[in-house]
Structures are given as C-alpha cells and as structure tokens.
Amino acid sequence: LGTVLRFKITKGVWSHQANVTVTTHAAVRFSASFVFTRDLYNTHYITYFMDTPLQLPLKKCSVVGNGGVLKHSGCGKEIDQADFIVRCNLPPLSKEYTTDVGTRTHLVSANPSIIEKNFQNLLWSRKSFVESMKAYGSSYIYIPAFSMKPGTDPSLRAYYALTDSASNQTVLFANPDFLKNVGRFWKNHGVHGKRLSTGLFLVSLALGLCEEVTAYGFWPFSVGLDERPVSHHYYDNILPSSRFHAMPEEFLQLWHLHKRGTLRMRVGDCA
C-alpha cells in the first residue's frame, strides 16, 4: 500500500496562482504550467499556474493534525525539529499550545469552510484574517479553491486579502485532479466516508513530497492509550455537526502505513 500510494502521488498536487484576468472561454488543463478557468456567477476567471515551488524531495516532514491527543503531549519540540511542517485548517498556535504542537509552519491548509466559519467568508472585513495568518510565518497557504464551486469565491478573497496586505505568504490552490485521485485511492483501500478529512489529504501530500513523514494529532477516539478522556481537538471539544468523514477508517489505514514503515505515527506523549 505504501509503495502504491507513493506512486500515485505525483506532480500537480497544487496550483500556484500567478495571475488572474477575465476571459470568455472555458478550459481545464493541467501540466507543468497550465490554465484553469472557472465560471463564477457568469464571470469566467482564468488563472495561470506554475509547477511545484518546492525543491523535492523534502527530508523530514511533520504533518500535524488537530486531535485532542496532542494536548499535554509535549510534542512541540519534536514537531519543530522537522525540515518541513504541515498543519491543518488554520489551527491556533498561541503560547498556551506551543509546548504540545510547536511553533513552526511551512504549509497550512485553509478550507473554504474555515474561511466561512471564522471570517464570515471575508465579505465584510479582512483585517482579522490577515492578522491571524501571521501566526504561520512565511508559509504556503494551501486552499482547495476549485474542488467545490461555493468555495471558490472565498478562496479568491483570501488570496487577494493576503496579496493586498503585502503578506510574505504564498497561496497555493489545490489541484482538483489531485484531490479527486487521492479520494478515489483511499476509497479503494477501505475509507468510505462522504469526504476525506483534510488531515488524510495532507498526509497523502506529504508522502509524495517527503522522504520521512511523521504524523501527529491523528486519533479519532474519545479515550487515549492511557484510558483518559481525549477532547476532539487540542484546542476545544466541539464535535463536528455532520459525519462527512470516516475517521476510524482513516486512522486504520494510517496505522497500516505506520506498521509497514511508510510513515511514523505519534499517538502518545513525546516528552
């Protein structure tokens, strides 16, 4: 499974936006440099993209989920020792959490649903969004802008908010073909949720970019190995309102990869 997964994760996992203009024709084309056009409210946006901005392969990577298993884990120092650190869905990195989750970030995902929930789709004010993004330093902001039509507009607003503020961050739009192919791959290997979690997408991404991958904060159960209660996230215990994801199935597949040596999973304390 590990070998097959590494083979499946190839170039084209992201789309780096270089320019936006208006056009009247539609096309989707992916290659080393490609064009993506999208119809939004009768407006056709054409976006020019470039290939991966990273020098591959990366050496040691930490993929940090948001699971409550990280709370009091003392894993922050170990996480920060990686060469490349990936985080999920704009998680809080304030001082109270850094001992457990670290401080460094090289790539962080920003789902349109998070932009909607936390920043009201950036319809009214962009200041709080721009300020909150400073927690992630000069990182890549990885957004699945084109996987579903409702997410495209807020994703573009996030891009413009960071660009207009002269942010030192780079927005990377996820390649829809990559998201589709990863979803198909995991469905064929026993994950039957309506949607894959962002965490599993990012682990899949890391396996294609990194020589060594360690996953933290992936634990879908309410009780830990020490039989103590585990909160849903390391920063809150708010349960999801719907069951889009098959988290136990995802964990099982990641555990299989751990046992085969394809990646390493941290499910207990690091200190």
Image: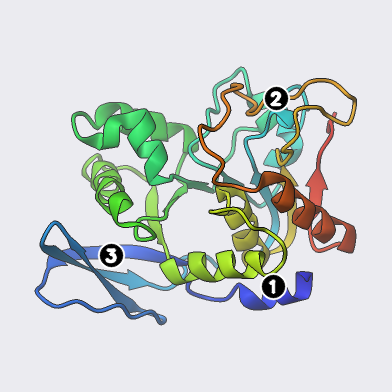
Is 162 placed left or right of 132 in the picture?
left
Is 259 placed left or right of 39 in the picture?
right
Q: Quadrant of residue 229?
A: top right
Q: Quadrant of residue 154?
A: top left
* Residue contact between numbered discs 1 and 3, judged by CB atoms under 8 Å: no
Measured as percent of width and height from the top left, residue 214 is found at 75, 50
Q: Residues within 10 Å of mark 2 (few under 14, many from 20)?
A: many
Which residue matches tag 1?
6
What residue is shown at x 80% (from left), y 48% (from top)? Answer: 265
Which residue matches tag 3?
18
Amino acid type, label 2: Thr
What residue is shown at x 37% (from left), y 64% (from top)? Answer: 16
Secondary structure beneath disc 2? helix
Q: CA distance from mark 2 to mark 1?
A: 32 Å
Q: CA distance from mark 2 to mark 3?
A: 37 Å
Q: Earlier in the sequence, mark 2 or mark 3?
A: 3
Amino acid type, label 1: Arg
Is 271 placed left or right of 76 in the picture?
right
Which residue matches tag 2?
99
Amino acid type, label 3: Ala
Q: Residues within 10 Å of mark 1 (few under 14, many from 20)?
A: some
Q: Is residue 89 above or below residue 196?
A: above
